[in-house]
Amino acid sequence: MTTTTQEWHCLPPEEVCKQLACEASTGLTEQEVQERQAAYGKNIIAPGKRKSALIRLLLQFHNPLIYILLFSASVALLMGSVVDSSIIYGVVLINAIIGFIQEDKAEKAISSLSGSLVTNATVIRNGETLVVDARELVPGDLVLLASGAKVPADMRLIKSRDLQTVEGVLTGESAPVEKQADQIKEKQTGLADRTNMVYASTLVTYGQATGIVVATGDQTEVGKISQMLNQAESLETPLTIKFQEFSKAITYVIIGFAVLAIAIGYFREGTLSQQSLLQSIALAVGAIPEGLPAAITITLAIGVSRMALRRVIIRKLPAVETLGSTTVICSDKTGTLTKNQMTVKHIYTGGVMYDVDGTGYAPQGDFKRGNETVTPNDIVPLNECLVAGLLCNDSQLVNADGVYDIQGDPTEGALIVSAHKAGMTYAKQAAVMPRLDAIPFESQHQYMASLHQSEKERIIYIKGSIEALLQRSNHMLTSTGEEVAIDKQAIIDAAASLSRKGIRVLTIARKKMDSDTSRLDHHHLETGLCIIGLQGMIDPPRPEVIESVAYCKGAGIDVKMITGDHVLTAVAIGQQIGLLDATLPEGVMTHLSGKELEEMDDATLMQNLPTLKVFARVTPEQKLRLVKLLQSQRHIVAMTGDGVNDSPALKQANIGVAMGITGTDVSKEAADIVLTDDNFASIYAAVEEGRAVYDNLIKIIMWTLPTNIGIGLIILAAVFMNIELPILPSQILWINMTMAGVLGLTLAFEPRLAGIMNRPPRDSESPILSGTIIWRTAFVGTLMTLAAFVLYQYLIHTAGETIEVARTVVVNTIVAIGVFYLFSCRSMGSAFKHLSMKTNRMLLPGIVIMIGLQLFITYTPFMNHIFHTSGVSFQWNIITLGTAFVSFLTIEFYKIFEKK
């Protein structure tokens, strides 16, 4: 026995039974089941490894800057500075807790996959029909399927009666798939086209079948996806990578200057003094932007709340920033680019092609012949085509508070809606022509028929495939409703013209019967049918998607459609939404099928990726391959999906985008963001917000770093001049934490800049800080150093103030300059702009709170004791504010000079 073959669909049923060593009538024996369970294990999906909560907490401390802070705190503790060391330890712990709470990295997707397998299965063993635990299934088991059942394992059908399954969990397509047991000889048939196979976790919606289990557990298609999900890399975001590089660079600089400070003290005093160690600690604490990680985290969280208002739920916080650098969006078709509501767009009857307006299930829309709007009731063949589609139908159109939906088959729903657009309802038509009998749709006959009693006669209405009905027809309707000899070629040509546009065609026919006919049978339909017409339908694009795709192009974002649907349908939708460029020269690749993709090597595919916009009939492995190839070309890739099949690609992508309405639990857990409305337009909105968040992050960084540079330079100056430190480690931590947490965060509420989506995505390889920002930061830091140090020296040597007063003035001066510098950072390029607080409602409260905190640390004895501060006179407060205002004017004039 072998289970290694991947081509079960190519084998006839008897050969499948032979290879799996089982009887098609009696199934396996109990002994065979036990032997195979020992060989293949249980029919379950093995969960992937996860990091424990403790490990994830400890990883929050895995950062060079944190190491320096912990080392500094430990040295301070050994020196007896309990307050300073406690404050440093506390800051580190707060940052770690914030990161731990926000970073939910637990891999729940595999658990969801395991839960997607059914608990029971109906099998034949030893010739008896049994209900067993689905986990006990083994290759070779004979399983019975019926409507409503969930398929428990991958199976090759050996018997089938009108079986239909929904395979959206694997293919992403919601339409039922007709199944049969016949052999498929083409080896390269894609998963979606293997009509004699059914797969674990898919749903049986109609009919019955018997199948032989060919794969269980991890060997099923859904199991393979689980393994790919385990192997897919969770990529770090561009901002995360840049901050790691940034942290390393700062670490080297801090270590260098700390060693320099110790060395200077050692050579000056001939020993390692406590003052030298205190200076190095102050230098380390001052140069590290302790409040920056928390400020960035909270800024991203604010972006999360903004995106929620635009129907985007963020699951993984760094995704907020990554969205802003997205260069490629790989989007599913059904339900994302389209409405997932089959809609009749064309009706061919009486030799005339009519167009039908409107999209989706809402029953509003006109009928047009060319540019002329027509009334269906006035056109006999058009009216009857609509009546037939409405009556030969088992589905219903429901209206829940103005929201229309279909209960039943989507294809039948499209026929109902087209009839409703003409003012018809099933209740009214059924009252005039009640149904007497019906033949439900069967895949072997490819049609459904219903018998009705009209006022004068009994009539059969039939809907089905053109192949099934055309061969049974002798007549067709003219434009006036008369029956004439059929012109089969005209009907074939009309159907072909619709099919080439990706339109699904349903043929409508009738047959008049004797008044005593009360039962309907297949022999009634073998001949003598009259073709009424064709109804052509498609899942139409969402109206807002066309605009969003155009906006994405304008923003430098490449949009690609990756779908499990047929090529013609995918291309048709791609053309309608503006994905495919009709101006490209002939021979340029714009779309590929899964089969063509499989046969193409990576080098050729990468060469053609820029022009390839549509990929149809693709497998999960191919989706993952496409994402990896795009990333190898330095693209930041956003990938949408809703099925289990999409999960590996969602996890591999820089941004995984799951669907909130139609998405499976697995896809949502693998994704970074979830769209609550399943709408592509929401992705565009998310990218826009992502760019705004990144802009604000840069403003916060540009505002924060000068303070650290200034403090570092103040301490270095004190080291070289061999004087008391103008500012202590505890005071530095106060500045870094309160300013970042109160003042810096106000920049997170800055509004989006005009024209933010008119610029190309930023280069993910570019550094966080551009040359301009570096020079600006250095200039402001130096200015802050001069202002604070000059004041300190004046207070000590000229004014005769105590060192506590001088240090307090230094702290207040740095904070005051930070307040004025806030306004400068609001406009990174223009001087004296964005000075008004009206566009940022948090600016004034932030400044007021910061002033209150400074009064608290300056004038309360408790805070004076902890932070070694002292109350200062009114004149020094005025001088502090004046110094800060002069600094602001200097910065703004520097921006004018810098621009020139």
Image: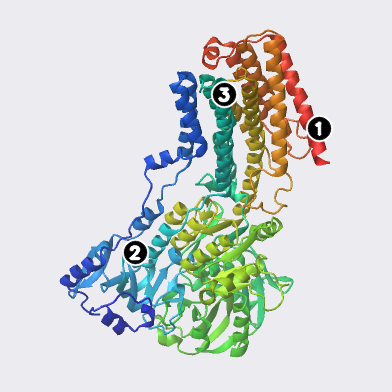
Q: Disc 3 marks which residue?
A: 265
Query: Is residue 345 among what the camera can see?
Result: no
Residue position marked by numbered label 1 in the rendering: 893
Between residue 629 and residue 362, name the one nearer to us.
629
Q: Residue at coordinates 23% horizontally, 78% vertically from top-left?
A: 22
- The answer to which of 485 and 539 lies nearer the viewer is 539
Crowd rating for badge 3 (residues with CA inside 10 Å; few <14, some 14–19, many 20+) = many
* N-term mark: 1 or 2: 2
Indicate the amino acid at tag 3: Gly
Relative to 212, does residue 657 appear above or below in the rendering?
above
Alpha carbon separation for disc pair 3 and 2: 65 Å
Residue in the image at 61% along x and 78% along y: 500
- When asked about the image quadrant of residue 327, the answer is bottom right
Type of the residue with mark 1: Phe
At mark 3, the secondary structure is: helix
Q: Nearer the viewer, mark 1 or mark 3?
A: 3
Q: Nearer the viewer, residue 215 or 477?
A: 215
Q: CA distance from mark 1 to mark 3?
A: 39 Å
Disc 2 target residue: 218
